[in-house]
């Protein structure tokens, strides 16, 4: 690196660090405010807690007969199940479109991609009528199954698999491996970077989903936490909305996202640099 480039690199690094720290400010404030009482939060919303109080988390767990704890488990069950099924179906579909040529291959793939151009919001009314007819409303099925055929995941995995050499698959077939053996023993492990990145995105999308469950569910006992959390209210609070409990709830909600990211961080970061260097 030239000497004249060092000051520019130092300035850019400094600016990036400032931007990263500034983006963490809301999260830090949320976490700090979750340990404050309601009166302290109203008087000291930007400062460090004078006395750390864990009562907000206890009130959160016992809120309305434990509905928050139940909705938290609902959200985990729905998000994990949805993510596993989405990755399984998308990877198998990507394998078929990438490594096999069958009649109507290109037409079917184009039609699937065309569905990504349709806003999901305009399909909700007919889907609501359809699922009400088959009695899927207010069930776990309606929170999981309708979205597992994820075209975006299929497309991204297909693009990744297109770059994998066919010689590996042909060698395995010569050794007597079947289609599923080739997929599970060779292609899927090699696709780990793309799978890891899409696992994070799929879990994040379902965990943060609000519109779909809000439309299709009316029973609190099967709602995910993202639907229940905004409805918090407490007569003992200084406000109609107990912001100190809300901060505790938000702090708890981000934990699964952090855990999932750190589990798949290696694969996610490796997927980011795919194609960045050409040999």
Image (cartoon, rainbow, N blue to C red):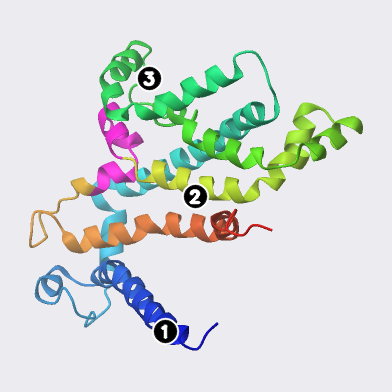
Horizontal placement of 275 versus 58: left or right?
Answer: right
* Mark 2 vs mark 1: in front: 1
* Mark 2 vs mark 3: in front: 2
Taking the view exactly as shown, the residue that stands out farthest to the top is 133
Measure the C-alpha gap from mark 2 to mark 1: 32 Å
Q: Which residue is mark 1?
A: 10
**In front: 157, or 241?**
157
| Helix, strand or loop under label 1 | helix
Going 26% across and 29% down the picture, which residue do you hit? 215
Would you call the spot at circle 1 few (<14 residues within 10 Å), some (14-19), or many (20 or more)? few
Measure the C-alpha gap from mark 3 to mark 1: 57 Å
Give the main secondary structure of the magenta stretch.
Answer: helix
Q: What numbered label is drawn on residue 200?
A: 2
| Helix, strand or loop under label 3 | loop
Measure the C-alpha gap from mark 2 to mark 3: 27 Å
Q: Is residue 195 above or below residue 141?
A: below
**In front: 44, or 16?**
16
**In front: 239, or 178?**
178
Q: Is there CB contact under 8 Å for labels 2 and 1?
A: no
Compare marks 2 and 1 and give the one earlier in the sequence.
Answer: 1
Q: Which residues are magenta?
A: 210-229
For the N terminus, the image quarter is: bottom right
Q: What numbered label is drawn on residue 136?
A: 3
Compare marks 2 and 3 and give the one earlier in the sequence.
Answer: 3
225 is within the stretch colored magenta: yes
Residue 4 position, x and y percent, is 45, 87
Residue 109 position, x and y percent, is 53, 23
Residue 13 lies in quadrant: bottom left
Compare marks 3 and 1 and give the one earlier in the sequence.
Answer: 1
| Helix, strand or loop under label 2 | helix
């Amino acid at each position: 690196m030239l000497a004249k480039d060092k000051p520019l690199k130092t300035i850019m690094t400094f600016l990036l660090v400032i931007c990263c720290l500034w983006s963490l400010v809301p999260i830090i404030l949320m976490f700090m405010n979750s340990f404050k009482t309601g009166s302290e939060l109203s008087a000291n919303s930007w400062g460090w807690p004078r006395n750390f109080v864990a009562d907000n988390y206890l009130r959160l767990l016992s809120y309305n007969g434990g509905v928050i704890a139940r909705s938290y488990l609902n959200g985990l069950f729905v998000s994990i199940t949805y993510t596993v099924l989405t990755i399984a179906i998308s990877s198998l579909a990507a394998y078929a479109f990438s490594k096999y040529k069958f009649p109507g291959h290109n037409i079917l793939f184009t039609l699937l991609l065309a569905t990504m151009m349709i806003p999901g919001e305009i399909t909700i009314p007919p889907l609501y009528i359809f699922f009400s007819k088959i009695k899927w409303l207010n069930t776990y099925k309606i929170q999981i199954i309708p979205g597992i055929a994820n075209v975006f995941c299929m497309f991204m995995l297909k693009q990744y698999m297109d770059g994998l050499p066919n010689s590996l698959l042909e060698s395995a077939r010569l050794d007597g491996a079947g289609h599923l053996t080739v997929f599970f023993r060779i292609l899927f492990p090699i696709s780990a970077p793309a799978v890891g990145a899409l696992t994070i995105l799929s879990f994040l999308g379902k965990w943060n989903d609000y519109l779909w469950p809000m439309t299709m569910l009316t029973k609190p006992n099967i709602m995910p936490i993202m639907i229940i959390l905004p409805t918090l209210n407490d007569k003992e609070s200084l406000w109609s909305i107990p912001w100190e409990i809300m901060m505790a709830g938000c702090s708890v909600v981000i934990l699964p996202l952090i855990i999932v990211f750190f589990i798949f961080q290696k694969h996610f970061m490796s997927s980011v640099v795919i194609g960045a260097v050409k040999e």
